[in-house]
Image (tube, helix red, strand yellow):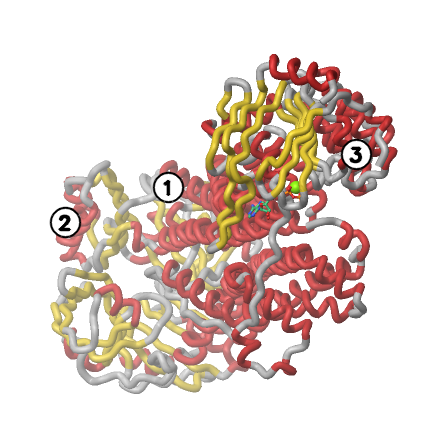
Amino acid sequence: MRKLDQKLIRDLTHMRGQALAIMLVIAAGVATFVMSMCAYNSLAWSKETFYREFRFGDVFSSVRRAPLSIIPRLKEISGVAAVETRLVYDVLLDVPEMTEPATARLISVPESGENELNKLYITRGRMMEPNRTGEVVVSEVFADAHSFVIGDSVQAILNGRSQQLKIVGVALSPEYVIQIQPGSIMPDDRRFGILWISQRDLEAAFDMTGAFNSLSLKLTYGANPDEVVDELDRLLKPFGSVGGYLRDQQLSHQYLSDEIAQLRGMAMMAPAIFLSVAAFLLNTVLSRVISQQREQIAALKAFGYTNWEVGLHYMNLALVISLAGTVIGAAFGIWMASGMTKLYHTYYRFPVLELRIDIQAVVLVFLITTAAAIFGTWFAVRSAIRLPPAEAMRPEPPPSFRPTLIERILPRHWLSPELRMVVRNVSRKPVKASLSVVGIAMAVAVMILGSFSLDAVNYMMDFQFRKAQRQDLTVTFVEPATASVVYEIGRLPGVIDSETMRSVATRIHFANRSKRVGIMGLESTPQLYRLLNTGEQPVAIPEFGIMLNTRLAEVLGVVPGDLLTVEVLEDKRPTLNLEVTKIVEEYSGANAYMNKQQLHKLLKESDVASGAFLKVDSNRVNEVFHELELRPGVASVAIKDAVIDSFQATMEKSVLVMRTFIAGFAAVIAIGVVYNSARISLSERSRDLATMRVIGFSKSEVSTVLLAEIALFTLLAIPIGWLFGFGLAALMVSGLDTDNYRIPLVINPSTLGVAALVVVVATVISAIIVQRRINELDLIGVLKTRE
Amino acid sequence: MSPGNTTIQTLTTKKSPVFRAVDVAKIYEMGEVQVHALRGVTLNLYDHEFVVLLGASGSGKSTLLNILGGLDVPTTGTVHYQDHELTASSDAELTKYRRNYVGFVFQFYNLIPSLTARENVELITEIAQSPMHPLEALEMVKLKDRADHFPAQLSGGEQQRVAIARAIAKKPKVLLCDEPTGALDVETGIVVLEAIARINRELGTTTAVITHNAAIAQMADRVISLSNGQIIGIEENAERIDASELKW
Ligand SMILES: Nc1ncnc2c1ncn2[C@@H]1O[C@H](COP(=O)(O)OP(=O)(O)OP(=O)(O)O)[C@@H](O)[C@H]1O
Ligand SMILES: [Mg+2]
């Protein structure tokens, strides 16, 4: 081995604590990156493959009832490659071990058993056999949630008639990779399931022979999707089309794409944070090493080692650390990605979802960390390269100190000599001191960034489902129900209060933008389904005009007072001109609201309801379920509490794992920065400290000089870190803004507290290590050596 | 002047100079103040020659040595090493010059603390063209048995001897020593000086040694005295005394 490399290894061993700390910071960044990229790659690949091989549709639409005879005309639309029509009905399902009903989406499968688009992947059992009635294939998550085995039966209410359905198979569909009930913002595997059933069965039950109510299209390569949708809407208008939409509005696809985009975002953000901290640490450590070794550098150069050889020697010190960090980080990242992929399996179902190691990402992150290491150490290494050997032969002049501003302001006796040393040391190297503070602040920020999402989601849930919506049950009807039906439901024993709503599919136009939106007509001062403003205060619904939620207003670029063109997509399809009266706060969906009576008037209809909100006596909930289940008009019943509870439970479980990792990573940063800056201060000042000890200062007095500095840095860093945390969280929130939900920028005080605590603990640990070093300070040794 | 002196005089003048320094000045700018470390030094050094530089602290000895060794460049004046004009050489050329021709012994040892005595020597032999064996070099300074000790485990004098072993191990054409015996007692001082003299004798290395100890001057072919950045006298010794006979 080259002797210079031998020196490298010895130097590294000597500074192993610092090297390890920096290595771990790099490893944390690399791990996050590799984990995100591998998970991204796995998810994206599984998605693409599933979509392609099972022919996921490009366009979707639903109609009230269209004859099959229209299909040839749909196929003629330029850009359409394939058409699949089907019957889709949401029905209530009586599952043996559940007291409350579940909602099942029944989707027809052609008699051949082979869909042309959105094909099924059978994971267990078989497809329905032609000519047999009452057989269904259920979606995997639903089957898993209820531990269904092949041969089990469920009881469904089809068009008011209870019918026994026999499970013959379990399947996956590219349309329902994640299974979310429309109107819900989260999956609920127990209460919402997909059931595929033979077309004949469904035609018979809903009296739809020769007709369809849902369709999906596949486009040719290079087709203009918007033109296809326009043409499709035109053809289906007479049959009660509520408007076609593309994949980007398809729920499962949206969630999946959001998740994938989120991984991308994480992959971008992590290296930026961790590697800049690592670059800074490498810079401080290497600057110190080089200034400590200037006489060695002089000797090397005097004997004919080139500037380049000397520079590379020190650069290698950084590169070894970064390489080790990369290797460890990549391995850890891959391991985390495999855990992540397993976690995805809870929500996202593909025929194959296996870890795909992204070699490109590993190579890329290696290049990035190497670049960061070179960048971080460049100035230090350059000083070693440029160091004139003759000059380096002479010891470095003692640093020049001046009384600082603080000392001039404060009365002399306020600062002990030890504290005066602290103040002078910090103010002599203000850049390094502030970078240390920034580094520790980054740890606080990472901690906040990693845990605020739970605060945000909890706030969102609380806002939406406790403060705004206070109903226990939400009932939707198959067809708009008459006032008498609603009245009857409101009078069911156990129902304390009820409210109705009318929802209608529309397309809202403003300027050159448009969006498919369901407008909900509500009573003028709703008590159950309330709308709130940003200040969480209920908003009364004006008699005229339309109200938009924040997301929709944003998408359309609308402010109160603007006039919207609303194209109703149901029945008589009137076009309405409505003024925006208010913007209401909501975190999920893009929704619009108006006065229910006004909506009836504009639609020229009687007092009907698409659904009802019920407040129910908690002891009689089962009774009410049972009653609703029996009613033919009822399409679905959503139970708010159950939904929220199950969601929060899974959410917290998965977040907890992430949170632990992130806390670990944040601690790594904090320890890395605190320990390094303390070690460097110790090495820079070991002579002073030894001298202090020799002239009679006690160990603890000597420690004060160093530890006070550490404490000062950490104290300054905490509030700054909170600010950084807010900033980064805001950045992340805006990046995660999707059509489905907006994440509020909410950070609980407890999150701030925990972030500070983690950093304080990291500081204390570092302080203890440094304290031990001070105790071991070899007085004679330190004073003997020249520096 | 003794007759012997004349012989050497004629002998040395016949030789071509290895180093030719003409009117060398070195000025350090220290903000407002200018420090004249060297003020017009003109000097020839010859092949095989053993030169001692004497002078008070701050007289410019180290500065001159550094310039001859290609570690530093003068502010004005020219320095030639054989055909190379050091004063016109690039940094890379100076590095090559040091690598191939020069051995240094520093006032402050400048050993690499993380390498053992032997490894410190190997660090240099690795990049030299025809070095001696590292242990041979350590043997010359009587430190072979401490080869595997780190600098921190050696006394100041022992460290200095390692530094000398390191300097001579590459069999340099030029050996420049800045107070090689400063930290040593008589006995070890003599060991060290013998090693230097042996290299000078056996390899014909042009050797320049800075010292405050006038006694050492008796070993030299010539003694050059510096004061305040100028040469104030060059004395030639009729006879070189062997290191073992030195008394101080
Ligand atoms: N890098 C420098 N910057 C400023 N002044 C310098 C520098 N190097 C040397 N000097 C000054 O130049 C003069 C000569 O220095 P030099 O080191 O050559 O003296 P010296 O004869 O070797 O002294 P000593 O015997 O104490 O080692 C001194 O006054 C010194 O202060
Ligand atoms: Mg000197």
Q: Residue at x 56, y 68 (%)?
A: A402
Ligand 2 image-quadrant field: top right
User: Nearer the N terminus, badge 1 or badge 2?
Assistant: 1
Tell me which amino acid carries mark 2: Glu
- Residue nearer the viewer, A319 or B60: B60
Percent across and percent down for residue B156 are: 80, 41
Q: Which mark is residue A51?
A: 1
Q: Chain of mark 3?
A: B
Percent across and percent down for residue B4 are: 74, 16
Question: Of discs 3 and 1, which sits in the foreground?
Answer: 3
Query: Is residue A38 visible from the viewing direction of this image?
Result: no
The span from disc 3 to disc 1 (Cα, nearest Å) is 94 Å
Q: Residue at x 63, y 69 (%)?
A: A422
Residue bearing mark 3: B215
Tell whether B16 sits left or right of A241: right
Q: Secondary structure at mark 3?
A: helix
A674 relative to B121, above or below: below
Percent across and percent down for residue A213 are: 26, 54
Residue bearing mark 2: A231
